[in-house]
Image (spheres, grey):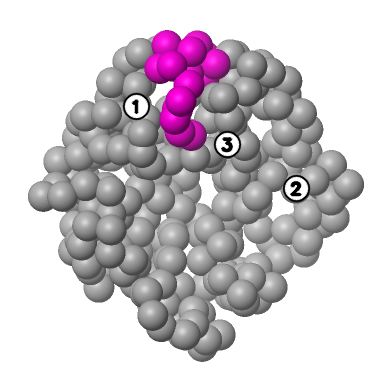
Amino acid sequence: MAGSVIACRVASYGDFAALAYEHLSGLGVKCVEIPVPAPDNIESTKAELERFGLSASTLHGECDVARADIAAAIRAQMPAFAALGTRYMFVSVKAGDTPLETAYQRLREAGDVAGENGVTIVLETHPDLLTNGEVGRRTMEAVAHPQVRVNFDTANVYFYNRDVDAVDELRQVAEFVGAVHLKDTDGGYRHWYFPALGTGVVKFPEIFAVLDDVGFAGPCTLEIEGIEGETPTERLVCERVAASADYLRGLGRL
């Protein structure tokens, strides 16, 4: 994983996102994943990141394959990537009623625009195009575009599938992975249980080993979405992020 970076998805802080930049900086995490800022907010976002010594390794954007004007929609988001020096666009894509061949073609069109701007679009591990390793590989092979890649989520493969192992699922798409969400889980199907890293079933050392084997160099983004039924507090949220950073540091990844 030479050249890869550890980041944190600011949404992991939930209602306490205003604390994220200062807290992450103090933990030694220097990269974040944030939404694509609106045009009027690009410069202020850049200034705020710089104030805390942070950079946006990934921006969460929009890539709707139901839109015939998908290329224009992607192009409209590119100024933020240029201004912030960000090379990865995280998106959740669902074909839905759009014919698969149309969805694939529109992803290629999106990839063309992203590539012109030095950006790689990474598709989240979500149904129905990236549900698991098998489906993700089929999508990648059909799209066949170097700027359209997988954002492999280590917990979502359990949430959306039964009787799976994240390491086995990753192996099926490893060559197509452009970015990773590091998220733990208890492994339950449709079970909203996403605690601190190292406290669930995900075998992160093996995940990293698979990524190392394919020379992965993209961002690995910590994501904590909490546990259904709990009441998040500032202390709980910050402690989980800190514990996850410590866990990654213990693995020699931070």
Mark 1 lies on residue:
176
Mark on residue 89? 3
Q: Is residue 141 among what the camera can see? A: yes
Q: Residue at x 68, y 18 (%)?
A: 69
Sequence-wise, which precedes: disc 2 or disc 1?
A: 2
Q: CA distance from mark 2 to mark 3?
A: 12 Å
Residue 215 in percent (x, y) is at: 32, 32
Label 1: element kind: helix
Left or right: 3 as drawn, with respect to 47: left
Up-down relation of residue 81 to residue 149 (above or below): below
Left or right: 218 as drawn, with respect to 195: right
Residue 234 in percent (x, y) is at: 56, 85
Q: Amino acid at mark 1?
A: Phe
Sequence-wise, which precedes: disc 2 or disc 3?
A: 2
Q: CA distance from mark 3 to mark 1?
A: 15 Å
Up-down relation of residue 233 to residue 175 (above or below): below
